[in-house]
Image (cartoon, rainbow, N blue to C red):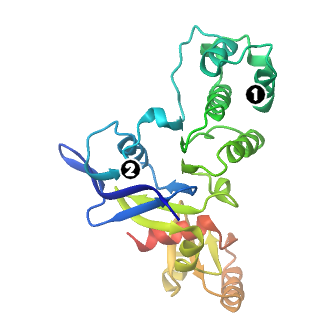
Amino acid sequence: MNTAISIKDLVVERPSKKILDFIGQEIEIPSGSIVAVLGENGAGKTTLIEALLGEIPFDGSVTPQIHPTEVGIVFQKNIYNDMLKVYELIELVTNYKRRDEAYSRLIHSYELETLANRYIKDLSGGEAQRLTLALTSTRNNSYYIFDEITSGLDFKKREKLLGNIKEFTRGKTVLHVTHYFEELVDWATHLLILKDGKIMFFGFISAFEDIYSHHSIIKIMDGKQEFLDSIELEKIKMEDSLGLIIENHNQESDWLRKVQQQNLDFTILKQNLYTSFLLCSERTK
């Protein structure tokens, strides 16, 4: 498989802090792969995107150095001329005219029909995001970068936009920054996990799930500290809860019985990408 982007020894520094530190690490993003970029706030996700686009100074190498005009980019917030109307911006960017069939198909696909005569400044965040994705979908780029594009959208609208994105990025190389793990199912091929500016994992999703394999997590919402301290299982913190890492079905049955005997409030999470991510974060502290 051909390499789309190679990143080696990448370092981004501020006067008092390294924002990214990939010293001794090299990753090769295959052509046509869908790479989910994950990490907590401040992990370095947006800084990585800026470095790939050459928008900030860095040490190390990015090959090829991609020019922003070569990439279809959609950020959480995009800047337009507020005094343009929606249809005017579409005509300007795409060269479609309102009477064109291509124009009609585009605004229908992204549910922009009722917005065509509105000024850009009057659009909600979700409406502006649909407009940006519509414009991006008309470009035949080799690379696409999406940075938290579905934040704030309800589930139905998010699913609709993701369906459109999957269609127009078919066969392209995509970097998708998100915190919605469900967006990655049956789409993303690779994970790039950042923590405090360092790479915690890069590779196939299937390999990640094998490395951080488990049967389930019993999430305990409350409980006597004495009992919680006595639990010998591997544990992870989950917001205001405690997660017990369960390795097999028999172990799950045994610990469910013990938790129920304590009259604790709990839920069971079967292994998925999110629970594997939690386990990775805990083990790489």
Would residue 188 be found to the left or right of residue 22 on screen?
Answer: right
The picture places residue 212, in percent across and down from the top left corner, at 53, 77
In the rendered structure, which disc, 2 or 1, sits on the residue that comes first in sequence?
A: 2
271 lies above or below 2: below
Front disc: 2 or 1:
1
Mark 2 and mark 1: Cα distance apart in space? 34 Å
The residue pinned by badge 2 equals 44
The picture places residue 96, in percent across and down from the top left corner, at 70, 18
Would residue 8 be found to the left or right of residue 98 on screen?
Answer: left
The picture places residue 16, in percent across and down from the top left corner, at 18, 46
| Quadrant placement of the C terminus | bottom left
The picture places residue 39, in percent across and down from the top left corner, at 47, 56
User: In terms of depth relative to the viewer, which is nearer, 241 or 225?
Assistant: 241
| Mark seen at residue 145 | none
Q: Residue at x 53, y 56 (%)?
A: 31
Residue 47 appears in view:
yes
Whether pointer 2 and pointer 1 mark residues with C-beta atoms closer than 8 Å, the reply is no
The residue pinned by badge 1 equals 106
User: In terms of depth relative to the viewer, which is nearer, 50 or 3?
Assistant: 3
Would residue 87 be found to the left or right of residue 139 on screen?
Answer: right
User: In terms of depth relative to the viewer, which is nearer, 242 or 248?
Assistant: 248
Q: Residue at x 53, y 85 (%)?
A: 233
Q: Amino acid at mark 2?
A: Gly
User: In terms of depth relative to the viewer, which is nearer, 81 or 106?
Assistant: 106
56 lies above or below 198: above
Element type where label 1 sits in the image: helix
Residue 222 appears in view:
no
